[in-house]
């Protein structure tokens, strides 16, 4: 099974290779086999990409927003037309089940391109009348922006970052995760086919050194990263030392609160989506599931029954519901946390093993795992695992659970299940999280902002807020009369 791209990088509208760069193998997580071999960007590749973006950006910014948006919407149409082949590529790159990638990955990128292609035309400044004088504000592009993507949603991340950047008149150099380098190259080709001028969306591959070189480059005006908190702190410190704009979409250990009056089956479905979708590799996952005493046993019974029925197997099989983890390191990490949970005294209620799958013996599979008897201070309740490991905790009252839910360095997301909507809004108002759900979990339409509080990040992806993060505000005061001066 091969997925070798034409070249490792895409710069100034064409495929570019530099074999002097470090080898970057692409591993299919379901089998452990190498399906492509790329090269990390050399200093020369990075300079070529930055220069291409710098040279192309001014003319692009001078176009009317509607003209820029037209190209983005054309690219969205191409993404949708090629959804199936892009979903397969994403499954090979990530190991995610094809039933997920067919609906959640290229489609989400297409939604972003379509939304920002239209929204930018109405994203304008303000007018202030002073009676005899007036002022107005302008939204202007930043220039060259850098996007650094995560490996759990590669093409979605490339779309979420590039669409608002390009719509606002910026150019972007995008570095995918070294674990999932393939689909960003496909998006770059689609942009070119849609009519995007050369140099405006460049893709360079590499490890941490490439990201650092991009983030610290003097031409770059903004860095947008999706990744872990430790990585985010390093990149933000680097960007801040150069006074660059930055958006950090980082990790979480989010609470999902289920009250006694919740619809149990809906709450169980939300908890499963918030822990097992994409094999648990979602930053916003609600991995601390707080269940009120009155329905605790019923919730657990249904949760265990439905979890045991999850179909694990070949990610390319449309019937498969859960694929492998991304790589061996993540597999070892998640298995390590299962062992830690047992050592800490939590009860392994369900899963926790490594399934034996014929033909996939070298894949990075793990069973969806549920721990009960979890206490707030346990590592499995405090640290981001980034795998299908759910911690279920009991609670009695509203004030208690709010305090416990907020007792975390993270603040990315939170969820509440209850039929009492006044309580739902009251509790959400108290939760320290940037993205919250009521009676559902993990939906992220492009029309609403996505991002976190506390250690979980700065800035927002999606919605009109993202256009704000990819622009700078200029104020212009206009005097229509004489200048009053004492001199």
Image (cartoon, grey):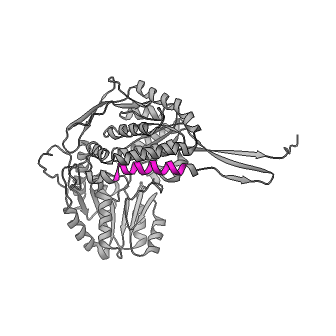
Q: How many marks?
A: 0
Query: Is residue 124 a member of the stretch shown in magenta?
Result: no
- On the image, the x and y values in percent for residue 284 come to 38, 55
Please name the predominant secondary structure of the magenta segment in the image: helix
Residue nearest the observer in this picture, 160 or 400: 160
Looking at the image, the residue that sits furthest to the left is: 358
Residue nearest the observer in this picture, 415 or 109: 109
Residue nearest the observer in this picture, 467 or 115: 115
Q: Residue at x 43, y 28 (%)?
A: 46
Which part of the image, by quadrant, shows the C terminus? top right
- On the image, the x and y values in percent for residue 34 come to 22, 36
- On the image, the x and y values in percent for residue 412 come to 42, 55
Q: Residue at x 36, y 33 (%)?
A: 205
Q: Residue at x 19, y 49 (%)?
A: 314
What's the magenta region? Answer: 104-120
Q: Is residue 385 above or below residue 71?
A: below
Left or right: 107 as drawn, with respect to 224: left
- On the image, the x and y values in percent for residue 57 come to 53, 34
Q: Residue 403 sits in which quadrant?
A: bottom left
Query: Is residue 117 a member of the stretch shown in magenta?
Result: yes
Visible residue check, residue 218: no
Which part of the image, by quadrant, shows the N terminus? top left
Visible residue check, residue 396: yes
Left or right: 342 as drawn, with respect to 400: left
């Amino acid at each position: 099974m091969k997925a070798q791209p034409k070249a490792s990088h895409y710069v100034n509208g064409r495929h570019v290779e530099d074999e002097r760069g470090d080898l970057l193998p692409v591993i299919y997580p379901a089998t452990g086999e190498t399906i492509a071999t790329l090269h990390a960007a050399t200093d020369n590749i990075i300079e070529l990409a930055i220069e291409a973006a710098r040279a192309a950006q001014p003319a692009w910014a001078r176009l009317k927003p509607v003209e820029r948006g037209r190209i983005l919407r054309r690219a969205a149409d191409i993404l949708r037309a090629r959804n199936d082949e892009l979903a397969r590529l994403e499954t090979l790159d990530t190991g995610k089940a094809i039933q997920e990638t067919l609906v959640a990955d290229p489609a989400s990128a297409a939604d972003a391109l379509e939304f920002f292609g239209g929204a930018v035309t109405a994203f304008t400044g303000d007018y202030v009348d002073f009676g005899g004088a007036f002022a107005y504000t302008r939204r202007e592009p930043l220039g060259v922006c850098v996007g650094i993507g995560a490996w759990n949603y590669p093409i979605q991340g490339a779309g979420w970052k590039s669409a608002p950047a390009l719509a606002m008149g910026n150019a972007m150099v995008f570095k995918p995760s070294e674990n999932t380098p393939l689909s960003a190259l496909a998006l770059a080709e689609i942009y070119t086919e849609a009519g995007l001028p050369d140099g405006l969306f460049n893709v360079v591959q590499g490890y941490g050194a490439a990201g650092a070189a991009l983030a610290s480059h003097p031409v770059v005006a903004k860095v947008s990263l999706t990744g872990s908190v430790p990585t985010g702190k390093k990149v933000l410190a680097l960007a801040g030392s150069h006074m660059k704009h930055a958006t950090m979409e980082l990790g979480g250990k989010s609470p999902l609160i289920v009250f006694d009056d919740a619809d149990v089956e809906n709450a169980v479905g939300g908890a499963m989506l918030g822990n097992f979708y994409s094999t648990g590799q979602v930053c916003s996952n609600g991995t601390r599931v707080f269940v009120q005493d009155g329905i605790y046993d019923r919730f657990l019974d249904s949760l265990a029954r439905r979890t045991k029925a999850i179909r694990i197997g070949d990610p390319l099989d449309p019937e498969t519901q859960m694929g492998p983890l991304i790589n061996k390191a993540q597999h070892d990490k998640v298995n390590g946390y299962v062992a830690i949970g047992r050592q800490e005294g939590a009860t392994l209620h369900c899963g926790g093993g490594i399934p034996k799958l014929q033909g996939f013996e070298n894949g990075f599979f793990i069973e969806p795992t549920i721990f009960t008897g979890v206490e707030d201070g346990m590592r499995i309740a405090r640290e981001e695992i980034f795998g299908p490991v759910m911690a279920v905790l009991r609670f009695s009252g509203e004030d208690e659970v709010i305090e416990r839910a907020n007792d975390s360095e993270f603040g990315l997301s939170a969820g509440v299940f209850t039929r009492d909507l006044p309580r739902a809004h009251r509790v959400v108002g108290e939760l320290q999280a940037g993205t919250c759900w009521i009676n559902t979990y993990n939906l992220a339409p492009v029309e609403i902002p996505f991002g976190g509080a506390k250690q979980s990040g700065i800035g927002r992806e999606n919605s009109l807020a993202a256009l704000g993060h990819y622009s700078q505000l200029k104020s212009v005061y206009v005097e229509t009369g004489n200048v009053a001066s004492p001199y």
